[in-house]
């Protein structure tokens, strides 16, 4: 059959109330199979999601046709995480039909809010890295940049966090239990992914050298699942393509017939393990191997997909850098460098120099951390066994680079620091430097982080390639983190400055002129108070704890890690509780400390810190002597939806990492946008937030990054620091003597011993300054006018931290792309 010369079009679905209501009803009856009077909330969610998805698909296809017509450059964003959260409210908001849908469902006697609560969070990420990726997809679509996100369709994601007597317990996060109405399975888009095997010499290539042939001994298929991603206003809809691992053969009949039933499905079980769980515990060799295979699995599938797309419209690959920008979101997809070389050389018969020019022209790399454990390295023996051809390519990249290195030529002793191979008894491949060499641009995610990249982890490579590192400070999407998460504040802003700020967030600077408007201050305070009441109700339901919305909501929500210093926050809670017990009748500022976050399953210290927080909270919350002056709660299973509850209600935003260790942070931006005041160190994007909001509107304390480095270098005695600070000494002693763990007095000795004898993260060193900053916060909160002025100034001056600005910077300075609408007008 001949295909039509142009796409057949159908009439796009209308956005009005009556049409939407009709479509919801039709989906409810004919897809869900329910009548109105029998439908559950899940049924209404499924029907509404499908009706809304129809409207996304109309715009999705139009976006694809527009991009094909203009043949522009596309962005391919490779990330092991995409923490997208719930999608229904986001789609309704960006399409501009939230109220329309609420009214349409209301005609059936159904509450939209109750329907939205049914949707699970997509368990595709853990923290800031994955949420940044989701914000970038939103901003690319909002700006009209043609982009595709590539990741893994995890069946269970990270894990569902629950507490058993205060200990973190991990359960599978079964987010796909009721299906996923937003995705489209593409069984015809499936790529073979090989592992293990051996490399043999093949026929000579263009350069006369035999082309290696890799014969893998295990093969799985990467099958695509597509989710439409709509930008603000709905003009552009891009794609999140996630890969699910499937066996080449689902079922082997021969062993089944012989009675070996497990053998008959062995391939299915082994292959599907690849896309089962995010970040398998890599404390074991098996866990390390699975993680390496996951990273290669999604990276190879994504690159094969990019090359297939390119060949559909172009001959050859020399122009690929002009048509495809591939962004590696952190070091996890660094295997993309040798994989793209392998595909170009082995499969498509290019010579090395052409392939390398194409690879470096396409790939760019975002570094998100200076911490050694996050700059992945893989044992040479593991890489040789799992991906033998890739190790050969890494060796050749390394050999060619070292032979051409200007730095090594001047100083041969630096060869070992520049080499991609870390020598020693455990030889390893350094994936961060590999990503650096294979990219035309490498960026940090805050001004401080980028400066430290140049000075520390990539010092030698920066000397070799002085123009390669650039800064792109992170941002957040205001559609999710203000319009959707805080509708009351969004409405107040609408009333004051009108519309247009949703995709031009720096317009919020107009609010700075309203700080002396007492009516606006009162309205701003009332919005915050309403949000706090909602969160207090949620805390009561989840934690069975009554808290007052009039108290200072002091919030630290993020991944649990020693460098993020939840321990410093807990020590402050203990010391504050002790002082309140000493003088219960003093004029204390009532405070609620709110924590949330997950610890990696194999990170014993982080899990012990969670237990300490819960044990301290139990004692504080049941102490009648301090009444309601201090409460503390650790909310379980932190995710995007919980963040949307907490962030609009926060008064004080805890961003207290050891200076020089947080790459950027995006939670700090979300809190400030929603009128919370930051208490933090000069770390990551806190530095730039302080510059934007002004020193009088942020509570900065503690050692700077340079002072941290100096203190570590000159020698540091934390035991002496603790002994010299009575508050800190008493708090540490209470933890040591079993005050919070009478059933096991020595439970927290690993924490206090480390604090006394090493304190690598300088908790003790910063405690006194942190205490003073917290005291200042308490005093400021008692002055409602002063506090509200500061809160408004934060909201007004953080518009620069929009992910729209960040993505625009990437587009202009790294990707070299322009929106297709702009190209079509030229």
Image (cartoon, rainbow, N blue to C red):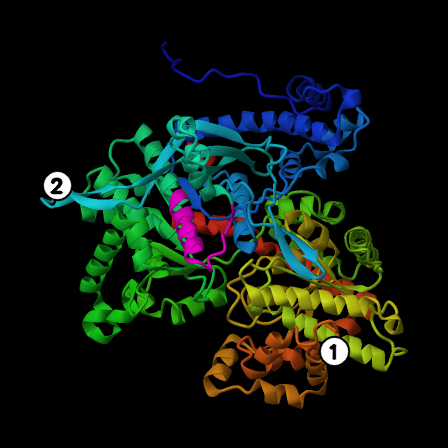
Q: Residue at x 79, y 33 (%)?
A: 111
Closer to the camera in the image, 466 or 188: 188
The 10 Å Cα crowd at callout 2, few under 14, some 14 to 19, many 20 or more, is few
Q: Residue at x 62, y 48 (%)?
A: 478
Closer to the camera in the image, 456 or 122: 122
Horizontal and vertical percent position of residue 776? 74, 75
Look at the image and say whether residue 20 sits in the magenta stretch: no
The 10 Å Cα crowd at callout 1, few under 14, some 14 to 19, many 20 or more, is many
Closer to the camera in the image, 505 or 653: 653
Chief secondary structure of the magenta span? Answer: helix
Q: Is residue 612 above or below residue 795?
A: below
In this figure, what is the number of numbered marks?
2
Look at the image and say whether residue 294 sits in the magenta stretch: yes
- Please tell me the numbered disc located at residue 575: 1
Horizontal and vertical percent position of residue 533? 82, 53
| Residue farthest toward the right in the current orientation of the protein | 585
Using the numbered discs, state the Cα–Cα distance from disc 1 to disc 2 in whole angstroms.
72 Å
Residue corresponding to mark 2? 206
* SS at circle 2: loop
Residue 221 position by quadrant: top left
| Residue farthest toward the left in the current orientation of the protein | 208
Q: Earlier in the sequence, mark 1 or mark 2?
A: 2
Residue 620 position by quadrant: bottom right
Q: Is residue 26 left or right of residue 583?
A: left
Asked if one can make out residue 604 in the rendered structure from this viewpoint, the answer is yes
Give the residues drawn in magenta, as a range: 277-297
Asked if one can make out residue 332 in the rendered structure from this viewpoint, the answer is no
């Amino acid at each position: 059959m001949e295909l039509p010369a142009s796409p057949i079009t159908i009439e796009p679905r209308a956005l009005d109330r009556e049409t939407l209501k009709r479509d919801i009803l039709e989906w409810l009856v004919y897809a869900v199979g329910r009548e109105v009077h029998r439908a559950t909330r899940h049924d209404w969610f499924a029907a509404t999601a499908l009706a809304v998805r129809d409207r996304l698909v109309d715009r999705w296809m139009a976006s694809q046709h527009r991009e094909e017509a203009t043949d522009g450059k596309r962005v391919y964003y490779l990330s092991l995480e995409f923490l997208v959260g719930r999608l229904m409210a986001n789609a309704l908001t960006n399409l501009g039909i939230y109220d329309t849908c609420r009214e349409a469902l209301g005609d059936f006697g159904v509450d939209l809010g109750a329907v939205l609560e049914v949707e699970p969070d997509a368990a595709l990420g853990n923290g800031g890295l994955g949420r940044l990726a989701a914000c970038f997809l939103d901003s690319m679509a909002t700006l009209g940049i043609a982009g595709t996100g590539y990741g893994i369709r995890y069946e269970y994601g990270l894990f569902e966090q629950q507490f058993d007597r205060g200990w973190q317990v991990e359960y599978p996060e079964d987010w796909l239990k009721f299906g996923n109405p937003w995705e489209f399975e593409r069984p015809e888009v499936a790529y073979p992914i090989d592992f293990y095997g051996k490399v043999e010499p093949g026929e000579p290539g263009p350069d006369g050298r035999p082309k290696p042939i890799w014969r893998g001994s295990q093969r799985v298929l990467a099958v695509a699942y597509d989710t439409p991603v709509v930008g603000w206003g709905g003009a552009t809809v891009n794609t999140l393509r996630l890969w699910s691992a499937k066996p080449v053969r689902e079922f082997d009949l021969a062993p089944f017939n012989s009675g070996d039933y497990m053998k008959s499905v062995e391939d299915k079980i082994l292959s599907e393990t690849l896309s089962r769980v995010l970040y398998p515990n890599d404390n074991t060799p098996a866990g390390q191997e699975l993680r390496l295979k996951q990273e290669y699995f999604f990276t190879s599938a994504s690159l094969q997909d990019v090359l297939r797309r390119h060949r559909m419209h172009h001959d050859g690959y020399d122009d690929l850098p002009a048509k495809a920008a591939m962004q590696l979101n952190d070091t996890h997809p660094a295997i993309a460098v040798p994989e793209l070389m392998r595909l170009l050389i082995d499969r498509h018969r290019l010579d090395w120099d052409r392939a390398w020019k194409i690879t470096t022209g396409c790939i760019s790399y975002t570094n998100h951390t200076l911490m050694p454990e996050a700059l992945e390295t893989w044992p040479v023996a593991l890489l040789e066994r799992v991906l033998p051809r890739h190790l050969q390519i890494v060796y050749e990249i390394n050999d060619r680079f070292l032979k051409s290195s200007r730095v090594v030529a001047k100083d041969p002793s630096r060869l070992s620091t520049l080499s991609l191979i870390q020598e020693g008894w455990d030889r390893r491949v350094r994936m961060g430097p590999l990503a650096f060499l294979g990219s035309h641009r490498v960026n940090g995610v805050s001004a401080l982080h980028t400066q430290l990249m140049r000075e520390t982890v990539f010092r030698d490579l920066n000397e070799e390639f002085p123009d390669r590192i650039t800064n792109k400070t992170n941002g957040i999407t205001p559609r999710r983190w203000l319009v959707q998460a805080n509708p009351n504040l969004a409405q107040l802003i609408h009333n004051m400055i009108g519309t247009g700020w949703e995709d031009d967030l720096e317009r919020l600077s107009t609010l700075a002129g309203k700080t002396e408007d007492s009516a606006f201050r009162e309205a701003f305070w009332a919005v915050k108070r309403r949000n706090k009441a909602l969160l207090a109700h949620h805390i009561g339901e989840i934690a069975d704890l009554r808290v007052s919305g009039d108290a200072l909501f002091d919030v630290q929500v993020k991944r649990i890690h020693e460098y993020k210093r939840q321990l410093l926050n807990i020590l402050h809670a203990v010391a504050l509780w002790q002082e309140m017990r000493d003088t219960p009748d003093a004029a204390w500022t009532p405070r609620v400390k709110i924590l949330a976050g997950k610890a990696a399953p194999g990170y014993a210290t982080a899990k012990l810190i969670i237990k300490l927080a819960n044990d301290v909270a139990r004692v504080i919350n049941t102490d009648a002597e301090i009444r309601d002056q201090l409460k503390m709660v650790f909310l379980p299973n932190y995710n995007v939806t919980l963040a949307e509850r907490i962030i609009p209600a926060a008064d004080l935003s805890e961003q207290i990492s050891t200076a020089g260790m947080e790459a950027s942070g995006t939670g700090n931006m979300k809190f400030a946008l929603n009128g919370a005041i930051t208490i933090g160190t000069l770390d990551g994007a806190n530095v730039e937030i302080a510059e934007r909001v002004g020193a009088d509107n942020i509570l900065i304390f503690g050692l700077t990054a340079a002072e941290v480095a100096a203190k570590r270098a000159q020698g540091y005695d934390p035991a002496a620091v603790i002994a010299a600070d009575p508050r800190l000494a008493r708090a540490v002693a209470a933890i040591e003597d079993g005050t919070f763990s009478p059933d096991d007095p020595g439970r927290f000795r690993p924490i206090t011993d480390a604090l006394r004898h090493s304190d690598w993260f300088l908790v003790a060193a910063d405690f006194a300054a942190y205490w003073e900053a917290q005291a200042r916060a308490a005093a400021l909160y008692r002055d409602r006018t002063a506090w509200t002025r500061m809160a408004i100034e934060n909201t007004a001056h953080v518009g620069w931290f929009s992910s729209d600005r960040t993505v625009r910077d990437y587009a202009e300075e790294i990707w070299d792309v322009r929106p297709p609408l702009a190209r079509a007008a030229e």
